[in-house]
């Protein structure tokens, strides 16, 4: 019996805030029986060469991917996934370089604010933990955990670095429309990530008017009724459907590689859009 090919189009590695290397994530995908993956690290494409080599070694197809941060005009943090783009296109490479600098500056400001409330961690340790990857709040959380300020990553977010906490510093101020433009300039397909986190359907309709092409209907945090809701919404707004596990390794529980398996037909639909569009 041959299994139908499947895909997991939302995975993180050590090139952003995942705890596993691209090689390890690809090996996990192979073990989970996934035929195609997208590594969607936050605001970076630096891991692509390693992911691509690891995917080839595992006999898995790698779909170029990224997850970009933005902020809606209502102040909601909006994550937009990009697929099948040219990672060398200048608008995109300039954007990721700017975002990496922004993220480093944010960590310095976060640490300064934490020090004001008696939390004496150092920015250097957070940056060192992020290593070659884009730095983010999960790295701060892991340093807080290591030094005993919290007993879990989620406690770090609820007490220190989540919205309105003493160490919170706003992230990207770019609009989702801007991000959508960056992905499309690189010939990619912008897809709204985990819409459940937004709880704002009018925003999705607005983004569809602004060039959004897909909706992440399937996600490890979407229960069946949510999936049905977003399936209908994607059909109504004529958006492509994607999905994935949003695997981060051991920093987030319950979302192993391949826990969301898409029928490969959805990957074909993405490719089909590429071949028929004149973006
Ligand atoms: P940043 O991009 O630096 O603002 O960090 C945001 C990332 O932190 C998200 O993409 C999630 O991976 C992670 N995150 C956000 N909230 C939580 C939470 N409550 N617990 C664990 N991880 C979280
Ligand atoms: Zn993340
Ligand atoms: Fe996200
Ligand atoms: Fe993600």
Image (tube, rainbow, N blue to C red):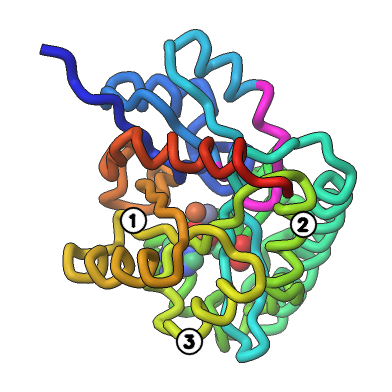
Q: Is residue 180 magenta?
A: no
Magenta segment boundaries in residue numbering: 40-49
- Single out the mark in the foreground, 3 or 1: 3
- Single out the mark in the foreground, 1 or 2: 2
Q: In the rendering, at what x and y percent does residue 6 appear?
A: 31, 31
Q: Are the two marked residues, 1 and 2, in contact with CB atoms closer than 8 angstroms?
A: no
Q: Secondary structure at mark 3?
A: helix
- For disc 3, the neighbor class at 10 Å (few under 14, some 14 to 19, many from 20) is few
Q: 52 or 180: nearer the eye?
A: 180
Q: Is residue 47 magenta?
A: yes
Q: Secondary structure at mark 2?
A: helix
Q: Is residue 81 left or right of residue 97?
A: left
CA–CA distance in space, label 3 to label 1: 20 Å
Q: Which residue is mark 3?
A: 202
Q: Which residue: 32% across, 68% down?
A: 230
Q: Is residue 66 left or right of residue 236?
A: right
Q: In the rendering, at what x and y percent does residue 110 appear?
A: 71, 72
> Image quadrant for the N terminus?
top left
CA–CA distance in space, label 1 to label 2: 24 Å
Q: Which residue: 63% across, 21% down?
A: 50
Q: Is residue 59 left or right of residue 84?
A: left
Q: In the rendering, at what x and y percent does residue 63 appear?
A: 54, 32
Tell me where residue 59 sits by quadrant: top left
Q: Which residue is mark 2?
A: 182
| Upstream in sequence: badge 1 or badge 2 | 2
Residue 219, numbered circle = 1
Residue 143 in view here: no
Q: 232 or 275: nearer the eye?
A: 275
| Upstream in sequence: badge 2 or badge 3 | 2
């Amino acid at each position: 019996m041959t299994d139908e090919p499947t895909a997991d189009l939302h995975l993180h590695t050590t090139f952003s805030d995942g705890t596993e290397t691209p090689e390890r994530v690809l090996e996990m995908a192979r073990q989970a029986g996934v035929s195609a993956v997208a590594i969607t690290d936050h605001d970076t494409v630096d891991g692509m060469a390693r992911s691509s080599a690891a995917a080839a070694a595992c006999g898995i197809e790698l779909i170029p991917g990224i997850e970009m941060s933005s902020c809606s005009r209502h102040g909601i943090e909006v994550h937009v996934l990009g697929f099948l783009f040219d990672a060398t296109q200048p608008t995109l490479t300039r954007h990721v370089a700017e975002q990496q600098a922004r993220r480093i500056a944010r960590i310095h400001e976060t640490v300064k604010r934490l020090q004001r409330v008696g939390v004496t961690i150092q920015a250097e340790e957070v940056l060192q933990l992020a290593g070659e990857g884009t730095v983010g709040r999960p790295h701060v959380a892991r340093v807080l955990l290591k030094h005993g300020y919290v007993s879990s990553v989620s406690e770090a977010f609820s007490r220190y670095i989540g919205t309105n906490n003493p160490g919170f510093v706003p992230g990207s101020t770019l609009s989702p429309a801007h991000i959508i433009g960056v992905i499309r300039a690189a010939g990619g397909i912008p897809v709204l990530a985990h819409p459940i986190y937004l709880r704002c359907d009018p925003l999705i309709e607005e983004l569809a008017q602004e060039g959004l092409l897909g909706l992440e209907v399937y996600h490890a945090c979407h229960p069946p009724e949510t999936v049905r809701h977003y399936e209908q919404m994607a059909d109504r707004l004529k958006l492509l459907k994607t999905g994935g596990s949003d695997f981060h390794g051991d920093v987030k529980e319950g979302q192993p590689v391949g826990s969301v398996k898409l029928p490969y037909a959805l990957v074909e639909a993405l490719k089909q859009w590429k071949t028929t569009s004149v973006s």
